[in-house]
Amino acid sequence: MDVIVIFGPPAVGKMAVGMELAAKTGFKLFHNHHVIELLLNFFEYGSPGFNRLRREFRMRIIEELGKSACHGIIFTYVWALDCPEDEEELKHYFTGLDVTIEQVKFIELYADQKTRLERNSTPLRLAEKKSKRDTDWSAGNLLQTDARYRLNSEGDFPYPHHLWIDNSGLGPDEVADIAISHFNISGR
């Protein structure tokens, strides 16, 4: 099974690229807000119950996808590269697929902060992510997350299957095509 992780800072386009990549490959898209939006109906973001269930639900969904006829998974993730617990969380998810992190294909998206602030309120983002509809809060969260964490590798990435893309001026379909070509992904 192919496992692709699309990572990068908030509002960089992970979900939009994932949707295009899923449409072109037939892989299943599991974007990070699938679980987040569900849990926000019951728990405050970051609370112990939220964090525990977010991790557990993601793990169980990935495990079940691994048992299904699905031939590929696309997972999106805001990865704080300076937080070892984020890397451990990713490794944990892949154990349910019998895949090591070294086998995962990583697509790292980069766009400058100004571009991401503009993307923060796109119709697709707001339609798919209810929690982002308070765009003032969401923009503030984006700025705080940027200030607090290292969200792009800056040329220092530890795993072999890695593609870095500045998608500031690219559409999601173009980024998906670049990734398919780079990783020689066979689709449907």
Image: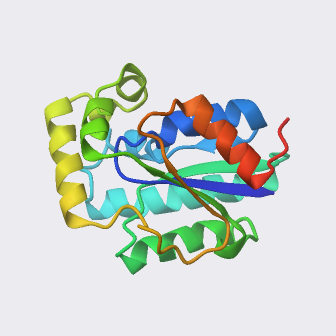
Coloring applied to the structure: rainbow
Depth check: give the residue in front, 157 or 80: 157
Residue 166 in the image: above or below residue 135: below
Name the residue: 39% across, 29% down. Answer: 125
- Residue 151, quarter of picture: bottom left
- Residue 38, quarter of picture: top left
Left or right: 162 with respect to 70?
left
Q: Quadrant of the N terminus?
A: bottom right
Name the residue: 34% across, 56% down. Answer: 50
Depth check: give the residue in front, 1 or 167: 167
Residue 55 in the image: above or below residue 110: below
- Residue 153, quarter of picture: bottom left
- The residue sitting at the top extreme is 123
Q: Quadrant of the C terminus?
A: top right
Residue 129 rendering spot, x and y as whole percentages: 38, 32
Left or right: 169 with respect to 159?
left
Residue 143 in the image: above or below residue 114: below
Residue 80 rendering spot, x and y as whole percentages: 36, 66
Depth check: give the residue in front, 52 or 145: 145
Residue 59 rendering spot, x and y as whole percentages: 58, 61
